[in-house]
Amino acid sequence: MARISYPELEGKPELKALTAQIIAERGKLHNLYKMLLNSPPIAEGWLNLLTAVRQKSLLSPKIRELVIMRIAVINKAEYEFISHTPHALKAGVTQEQINEIEHWNKSKLFDAVDRAVFAYTDSMTVDVHVPQAIFDAVNQHFDARGMTELTATIATYNLVSRFLEALEIDPEPK
């Protein structure tokens, strides 16, 4: 059960447009967004940021989903992991790869780009400060826009998992 209550949405016309936008962009009002609606300005900014990261970035969906899944593993964010498994599969990540994300560095299922991205994700998520060698290894696969979008994706999904876990947001019903 979530640590704070989800807001009552009935009878709040000031939330109607934002709620409709969230549903239009996300397909439904997920518990994450329900919780965010406790602060409409934060919910709106969050939606805009996540829309840019997920729908306007040129980063490949496969790389994006590998990053998100790895962050979920590191941060023990089950909600995030479960929510993104279908997206990862749709983006071309295999179930076998998903099963090995936790131990990616011992797996033979990931190519050089995936491995460089995982190392960068791990470094940003666990250590915050990225050693030059790890940066150089990933930077050889991306141009400036790609590095910006990869870095923003990693930073953003660390935000997501930390928010989900700190407030113990309820997983979506099956």
Image (spheres, rainbow, N blue to C red):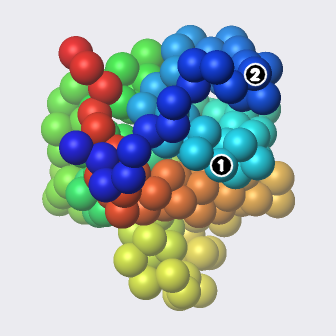
> How packed is label 2: few (under 14 Cα within 10 Å), some, or many (20 or more)?
few
Residue 87 visible somewhere in the drawing:
yes
Tell me: residue 22, above or below residue 59.
above
Q: In what element is the residue under mark 2? A: helix
Image quarter of the N terminus:
top left
Q: In what element is the residue under mark 1? A: loop
Q: Amino acid at mark 2?
A: Pro
Q: Amino acid at mark 1?
A: Ser
Image quarter of the C terminus:
top left
Q: Residue at position x 71%, y 43% from top?
A: 40
Q: Residue at position x 55%, y 69% from top?
A: 137
The x and y percentages for residue 14 are 78, 29
Residue 129, quarter of picture: bottom right
The x and y percentages for residue 128 are 51, 82
Q: Residue at position x 29%, y 38% from top?
A: 170
Which residue is denoted by mark 2 in the rendering? 13
Residue 141 visible somewhere in the drawing:
no
Q: Residue at position x 53%, y 60% from top?
A: 159
Tell me: residue 148, above or below residue 170.
below
Q: Decide if residue 170 is on the left or right side of residue 34.
A: left
Q: Decide if residue 135 is on the left or right side of residue 97.
A: right
Q: Decide if residue 117 is on the left or right side of residue 86.
A: right
The x and y percentages for residue 15 are 72, 28
The x and y percentages for residue 73 are 27, 54
Which residue is denoted by mark 1 in the rendering? 39
Q: Nearer the viewer, mark 1 or mark 2?
A: 2
Sequence-wise, the earlier of marks 1 and 2 is 2
Residue 12, quarter of picture: top right
Q: In terms of depth relative to the viewer, which is nearer, 102 or 47?
A: 47
